[in-house]
Image (spheres, coloured by chain):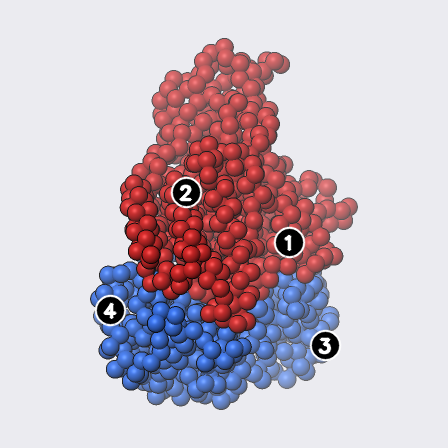
Amino acid sequence: MKLQYIGLNEIKGPLVFIDNVRGIAFEEVLEIKLNNGEIRHGRVVEIDDNLAAVLVFEGTNELSLNNTTAKFLGHPMEIGVSKEVLGRMFSGLGSPIDGLGPIYVEKTLDINGLPLNPVAREYPRNYINTGISSIDGLTTLIRGQKLPIFSGAGLPHNELAVQIVKQAKIADKKGEEFCIVFAAMGVKNDVADFFKRSFEEAGVLEKVVMFLNLSNDPIIERLIAPKCALTTAEYLAYEKGMHVLVILTDMTSYCEALREFSSSKGEIPGRKGYPGYLYSELASLYERAGIVKDSKGSVTQIPILTMPNDDITHPIPDLTGYITEGQIVLSRELHQKGVYPPVGVLPSLSRLMKDGIGQGYTRDDHQDLMNQLYASYARVMDARSLASVIGEDELSGIDKKYIQFGNLFEKHYLNQNSNQNRSIEETLDLGWSLLSVLPKSELDRVDEKLVDEFYNQEKAFREFQIDDKIVIHKEAM
Amino acid sequence: MNKIYSINGPVIKIKDSTDFQIMEMVHVGEKKLLGEVISMSKEYTVIQVYESTTGLKPGEPVYGTGEPISLDLGPGLIGNIFDGIQRPLTAISKTDGNFIVPGTNVKALDESKIWDVLFACKKGDNLSHGDVFAYVQESELIIHRLLVPQGKSGLVETVKKDGKYKITDELVEIVDEFSVKHSLTMVQRWPIKKSRPFSRRLTLSVPLISGQRVIDTLFPIAKGGTAAVPGGFGTGKTMMQHQFAKWCDADIIVYIGCGERGNEMTQTLEEFKDLVDPKSGKPLIERTILIANTSNMPVAAREASIYTGITMAEYYRDMGYHVAVMADSTSRWAEALREISGRLEEMPAEEGFPAYLPSRLSQFYERAGYVKTLNDAEGSVSIVGAISPQGADFSEPVTQNTKRFVRCFWALDKELAYTRHYSAINWNLSYSEYVGDLSKWFNKNVGVNFIQDRQKLIAILAEENKLMEIVKLIGEDVLPDDQKLVLQISKVIRVGYLQQNAFHKDDTFVPLKKQLLMMEIILYLYKRAQYIVKQGFAFSLLTSTGIFEKIIKIKYDIPNDKLSMFDDYYKMIDESLNSIR
């Protein structure tokens, strides 16, 4: 018989304090029953002898100091899982909300997970073909990687995520099982609906597990949702051998919720009011991606976050970038130019790609080609900023060439249709065609043999229908 | 019996106890989680726990150990991977599976392993603290010198025969002046937050050579020196630490992954097993100790990992080795300090960091040095600490305070990284205070012109920096030819010299001799080209010869073992420039 505690000592934001408790554990969960029969859930966040501070997931509205009965459940926050979760929809706390009743539970797991032993990890090397040139060619996604999308309000990050999901599944070979775990944190109803509809259209709905915490749901549920999602993902990957793609959106709402919770707990704030442990907290989510040595499954994460005021140095994108293995940054400027997906190439990066591309994975020339495209595109930026000062007409021949290259690169390489699926060969060949617009001597990052093999200026001029009037060395004439 | 009174994250309190001492190591709760006493008053004893406290209850017991957090030092460290509190991760994965469970109690060093011991003392010898009493071949590269631990000295009474022993076996027995017997084994313990003693410090006069041109030539670090590598995310901090760890000419590398990515540690582990040390032809792991406390492991152990690493480094220094410590990243360590300080409700200083951040940083960096050890050998500990400044802003407290305690500053630059210029060390922001101390060594061992050439290179780059201000405003075309030449030769220096390809077999490590020859040929080209420009030939004639591109590609085209090929390039310069006339 478990002890039940009647009444509360204090209510403060999402926290309640219960006095005279005995034998309860740190981070234990409890049920709080209201007089009207409603049951809420909570977790112990601090214990001072016999005074417990409890975080109520569903919020403290309507609670009073004497209308509740609390029952401690004797274990930390857990979620029941089985393969039946596929195709189902859950609340942020992991209870089904699609009206199909409870699932059969094969196993209950602690949602906090445990840190993966680095010795047990397998270093990720297999690339995921997304069919999107800017990702496959320049920031290749690797199975087992955590690669966030840094976006801003109004940018098409959701469309991009859906396109990755749709096209990545086709690239999967040998009938290996593939599934998606989707966690929505504080997103609007219609955004959640957009994802659901898109999964349906792509015909993958029965392969998706959804955890929804909408923007009007309690914030504490928001802190639980990604943990439920990742626990489910780890189960499917490491115990059922599936390749799991986890989409977490929107990490910014998650961090805001954490700040709200932290300040109501009276903690000393760090940068911009976020708690000092924001880094550790984010790491405990992001680090739950990877591949384990003795399992054939994998967890790949694509967290989406909207940068407040498009500021990449804001604590949320900043700390995220220090934990994740690269980032895909969306650019408002490209979006306004009508380029989709508007991937801002220069600040984007995939840290794991160096070992997952090239011979045996994509194609020999991939690494060099990518370096050259980056370097040349960086030069375009210099030329453009110079042109904005002295005017394009006054530019030197070579700078004009770069401007031309930059425009073609954005129009043909970055830009693609939201259901266009380019093969890796197409993407790489397109890169070479674009480089061929530049004079051969400008290609200083690639091996000469590769230049001989792939550089073809005439073909490029035909392909992009340009007749070349730009003279490189004016003085030489 | 001491019992837990309150729990708040990794911080727990005990009420009304006077049994503990400050910094004492304790075991907390039924699971015996590792913890450390961090403050006390008559009323409360405050303990930080190095493992997850989920499931801990008030009323569970706390056991003291009577000693501060200490390491087991002995054979078996090299080639191994530990977490921040010296739990052996490979052994743990065998007993506990893929995930790290709190409260695991596996011994740091394998006590069942058998080592070949050769004794260096005989009956009647007088041994004192720090003396070598035996040798063990620890890995293919490292001979482990067994040292007499602190507090033990005297005349050797018995010595076992050379042969096979376990680390806990008693090997030597000594009798001190009070006729007390001490037995010596292969293991000794040492508290992580206390630096190990040595005889005296020596001046730093030998460089730690890394084969990375921008470091060795422009901003060299001395053996026993300290360097900081600040850089925003994606600027290649980890990549640079890896390159340094792979190629630098230290005897032993201690690589501390402090609050960093799990996949990166796995990569380091795999790569170091495969990669071969250029000097010895043996895998790099044979000279490496890895400390991995990834970002999702408990935060208090992250704080400890830095000390764990440096203590191991000092231990090998005392045997007469040159050890290089890579700490990636010290910002995560500082954040761990901040997090714990916040839990203790201490008054925060700048940006929420505790006021004692600078003193902790200085304590860490001051453990570097080149010393005469107690047994009269020479050894050194060099530290390269990565910094991850918030928002890539170097004015934040960790970068600024670290700058006060290190003498090398290798600033990584976002713009350079965007153009994939690696190593992205910005030559205008970086500096090394060791150049003066090391110039004698360079001039004697590499070439008499080394330091002078280096200075010329820096002068050209500084000139370019000035000219770029103008170019950004009005374009390159309007510059006079001699200034265009400065830009052109700077490009050769930037692309052909400073930029280095870690994935190219010759370029990943470049010997000092080749570095000097490369500098000299670039300067020769500059001198010849200046002459041509002075004579009034059009600048475009110079560029159309293609000689600049040829010199840029030298780093790939001349293999490290065929340096005589430089002569051909001198001829090539002469021919193509003479053709202009």
Work out whether residue B389 can be spotted: yes
Q: Are marks 2 and 3 on the same chain?
A: no
Q: Chain of mark 2?
A: B
Residues at marks 1 and 3, CA–CA distance in whole angstroms? 53 Å
Q: Are marks 4 and 2 on the same chain?
A: no
In the figure, the red chain has which letter? Answer: B
Comparing marks 4 and 3, which lies closer to the viewer?
A: 4
10 Å crowding of disc 4: few (<14), some (14-19), many (20+)? some
Residues at marks 2 and 3, CA–CA distance in whole angstroms? 82 Å
**B323 or B126: nearer the viewer:** B323
Comparing marks 1 and 3, which lies closer to the viewer?
A: 1
At label 3, the amino acid type is Asn
Q: Which mark is residue B516?
A: 2
Say if mark 1 contacts mark 3, CB within 8 Å.
no
Image quadrant assignment for residue A31: bottom right
The picture places residue A320, in percent across and down from the top left corner, at: 52, 66
In the figure, the blue chain has which letter? Answer: A
At label 2, the amino acid type is Leu
